[in-house]
Amino acid sequence: MALPGIFRRLKRDEQGATLVEFALVSPVFFMALIGMFDICYNIYAASIINGALQKAARDSTIEAADNNQSSIDSRVSDAVRKVVPTAQFSFERSAYTNFSDVGRPEDFTDSNNDGMCNDGEAFEDVNGNAQWDADRGSTGFGGARDAVLYTVTVTYNRQFPLHKMIGLSPTVTTQATTVLRNQPFAMQDVTVTVEYCS
């Protein structure tokens, strides 16, 4: 069956093919582009958080810095909020006698060889809270010559709508950590008492 003249011309006509191809490719292209923007934004935000944390940590190492804790923390949040206005912050500080003590548990005598501090076993109460801890750090700025682990956790809303399309969380949580030694403004106070596990 012969096609009428107009249909024969339409069959051979290639005008508009680019438009159809673009319509097929563009959703994938724009999704990839938005994803790249989201990743770059989060990397930039993390670098701002790390920079602000390093500066605040250096300010925390001087004598009497614990009197300025809210001021030091607000400098971090002010710097980050210039880039991430919706950011919510959580700050933690733990002080240790030495860098090698960071994250280490308090030593104890494991009399029953079960790997846990229990049944009246003796332990060194390094942080002075009268209980055995899996992390021997004491909360706060510490004293002279102490190594201080300073951690800031930042949670903020994603800036690009990609999370709705591919099922990601609408928020991003980033954590930055640094360890610095306090200045030697006095003798280091090292007091360890022996306590007993319950």
Image: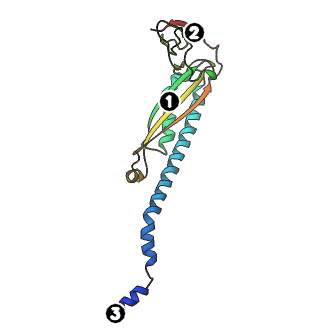
Of residue 35 and residue 75, the one placed in the foreground of this image is 35
Q: Position of residue 190 (x, y in %)?
A: 60, 11
User: Could you tell me how far apart the alpha carbons at marks 1 and 2 are, in whole angstroms?
Assistant: 32 Å
Q: Nearer the viewer, mark 2 or mark 3?
A: 3
Counting residues from the start of the chain, the first of labels 1 and 2 encountered is: 1
SS under mark 1: helix
Q: Residues within 10 Å of mark 1 (few under 14, many from 20)?
A: few
Q: Residues within 10 Å of mark 2 (few under 14, many from 20)?
A: few
Q: Quadrant of the N terminus?
A: bottom left
What mark, if any, has residue 192 been given in the picture? 2
**Location of mark 3 (residue):** 4
In this rendering, position of residue 4 left or right of residue 194: left
Q: Position of residue 121 (x, y in %)?
A: 51, 7
Observer-side mark, 1 or 2, equals 2
Mark 3 to mark 1: distance in Å? 82 Å
Work out how far the residue at label 2 is from the one at label 3, CA to CA, in angstroms. 100 Å
Badge 1 is on which residue? Answer: 71
Residue 98 vs 34, above or below: the answer is above
- Of residue 129 and residue 69, the one placed in the foreground of this image is 129
Question: Of the residues shown, which amino acid type is indicated by label 1?
Answer: Ser
* Chain-order first, disc 2 or disc 3: 3
